[in-house]
Amino acid sequence: MRIILFTGKGGVGKTTVATATAIKAAKEGKKTLIISTDPAHSLSDALDQELSPEPIEIAPNLFAQEFDVYYSMQKYWKNMRNLMNTIFRWKGIKNVVAEELSVLPGMEEASAFLWLEKYYEEGDYDLIVIDSAPTGETLTLLSLPQVAKSWMTKAFSNKNLAVKTVTKGLKFFTGIPLDKGLEEMDELFNKLEKIQKVFLDPEVASIRIVTNPERMVIKEARRAYTYLQLYGYNVDAVIINRILPETKVGEAFKYYIESQKKYIKEIEESFQPLPILKVQHQGREVFGMSLLEKIGDSIYKDKKASEVLYLDKPFEVIENNNGYFFKTKLPFVLEGEVALKKFGDELVIDLGNRRKSIILPKFASFLKLEDYRFKAPWLVVSLVK
């Protein structure tokens, strides 16, 4: 099985690109499931048909699903929900509020991971395409297993018997086997850890960043790329969406076309050597299978939509006693061409007459540039506290 997750700033067209990819893969003969993890679901709008919390077949080889956290908890994690709901009510919280609070923070993302774990174990699909929430929520999703496990350990460890004592008392008064909820919760977090290991396997899982040729969008895309690399996830392509064709716009868009050219060049240099795929602006709203199929063909051309488009680790962070070494790969660069400056959390690398910008993790804002060296193809930067 392959898993491809699409991420990017809200409004860049992730749903369009993800759905076009799924349609392309299905046409290539891959049994494909596209799922939306974004609470503001737009997958059904893009496909122009109703979807459900369970996968439904919408075309040959193509299935679609929109997550619903309440449906998921009712079907698969009912005991755990009863546990939380009962504890909140026992603490005097009104029924309606207790129902809402029983969905723990992060459960929207967790339910997505748990469905993925189920599909991965069953092996019914060749490809799962994930139309993810905007970048920040995607990073939350991918880091959820560690956070959730930490929360679980603190709240329900042997040292913390308060909740277990409460649940025993509640079981006596209510007759609900709430210890089953604790077991279900423990199983839930084990599954989260398991599917995260799948996501970290670059032969199985790829992340594709969708961006537009606009300054603010590019900056967020670069930051997402840095963090995804930092967490060990394989980014195998960047897709530039909504490129206006030069020949079909009037004087009003002249300035936008000029800035667009500059930003496309910036994207190509910033994300080198990743494949940069491009999508022309369609000049209209994008929905419906036929238009999405056309977009999928234009994105991938002679490539297979489901294949791993790039496999490498061009960015790495190494901790030392005084601070950190940041290693980045600069292919096709010669020694003597590299000059470097640091501004806050950004490294600006001059490569002859070209410039490459790398967004560092936020904590690097407080580190000082001590030294850097280049030995092809690696640039090693030393930052100290």
Image (spheres, helix red, strand yellow):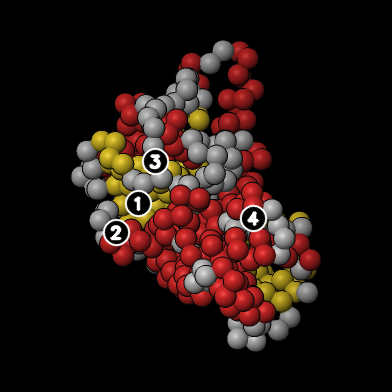
Residue displayed at 70% across by 57% down? 93
**Disc 1, disc 3: CB below 8 Å?**
no
Residue 275 shows up from this direction: no
Residue displayed at 39% across by 27% down? 48
**Disc 4, disc 3: CB below 8 Å?**
no
What separation in Å lies between label 4 and label 1 (alpha carbons)? 34 Å
Determine whether, in the image, residue 9 is placed left or right of residue 61.
right
Look at mark 1 in the image and give the residue it sits on: 128
Q: Earlier in the sequence, mark 2 or mark 3?
A: 2
Q: Earlier in the sequence, mark 2 or mark 4?
A: 2
Count of labels in the image: 4
SS at circle 4: helix
On the image, the x and y values in percent for residue 208 come to 46, 49
Look at mark 3 in the image and give the residue it sits on: 52
- Amino acid type, mark 2: Met
Quadrant location of the C terminus in the rendered image = bottom right
Look at mark 4 in the image and give the residue it sits on: 98
Q: Nearer the viewer, mark 2 or mark 4?
A: 4
SS at circle 3: loop
In front of the other: 323 or 262: 323
**Disc 2, disc 3: CB below 8 Å?**
no
**Disc 1, disc 2: CB below 8 Å?**
yes
Quadrant location of the N terminus in the rendered image = bottom left
- Amino acid type, mark 4: Ala
Crowding around mark 2 (Cα neighbors within 10 Å: few <14, some 14 to 19, many 20+) is some
SS at circle 2: loop
- Amino acid type, mark 1: Ile
